Amino acid sequence: MKNILLSIVVLCVTLSFTTEKGTRAGDNGSLLGAVTYKVSTESSLLPDAGCEIYIINETDVKSTKYADIADKIGLFQRNKTFCSYTIYNTIDADKIKKARENFASLSDYVWENIRGFQKLPAMVRAKTNSSGDYSLSLKPGRYYILYVSGNLKSNNIAESKGIIDYKVVDIKPARETIQNINFDKHENLMLLQVIAIAGEGC
């Protein structure tokens, strides 16, 4: 009888140190980094305090309509660059008008997707501290991360709350993963890349 009771106690203690999918609590990984911003090419990096961070495991996104959110944000960022190039390198009023209208439509579409993505049930939310730093403990796996700047905004609907950036990271058991982000008010136009993707629709 004593042996049975002892076995039950040992089993209970063992299970208490185990989380979902057989991962022990001590095997969680850490995601940490610093988020910064600058307002001109000559300014120094400043801590992006209050940057909003949305983190979700890839498995919790795959079965939703936001599984391709990375592609949509990438398309948005490329078209933002192309529109800037078009607007500031032509005096053709019709071209400028068309570029702005196309980008505004894309911005609306991406904003709707971002809002839905942010509301997914398994979403983990965090904010950077006054030094622009953040740190989270996460179960091992592949994660999608959306960053929304707390200090820089843009004049399109998708970035009216803050300039956005998006990353995918792999969290390893009992290891630190560092992901730093820098937001730049005056984005590099990357003219050669812009010319290469000129047909993508802005």
Image (cartoon, helix red, strand yellow):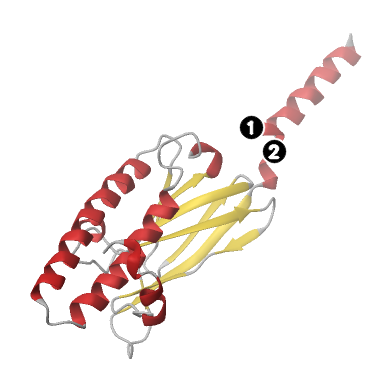
Residue 50, can we see it?
A: no
The residue lying at 28 percent from left, 76 percent from top is: 185
Decide: is 104 above or below 112.
below
In x, y percent, where is residue 123? 43, 41
> Label 1 belongs to which residue?
20
Residue 64 marker: none
- Front in this rendered view, residue 199 or 151: 199
Q: Amino acid at mark 2?
A: Thr
Please tell me whether mark 1 sits on a helix, a strand or a loop. Answer: helix
Q: Is residue 19 left or right of residue 56?
A: right
> Label 2 belongs to which residue?
23
Q: Are marks 2 and 1 in contact (CB under 8 Å)?
A: yes
Q: Amino acid at mark 1?
A: Glu
Q: Residue furthest left?
A: 93
Decide: is 43 above or below 10.
below
Q: Quadrant of residue 18?
A: top right
- Front in this rendered view, residue 128 or 70: 70
Query: Quick one: label 1, few (<14), some, or many (20+) residues within 10 Å?
Result: few
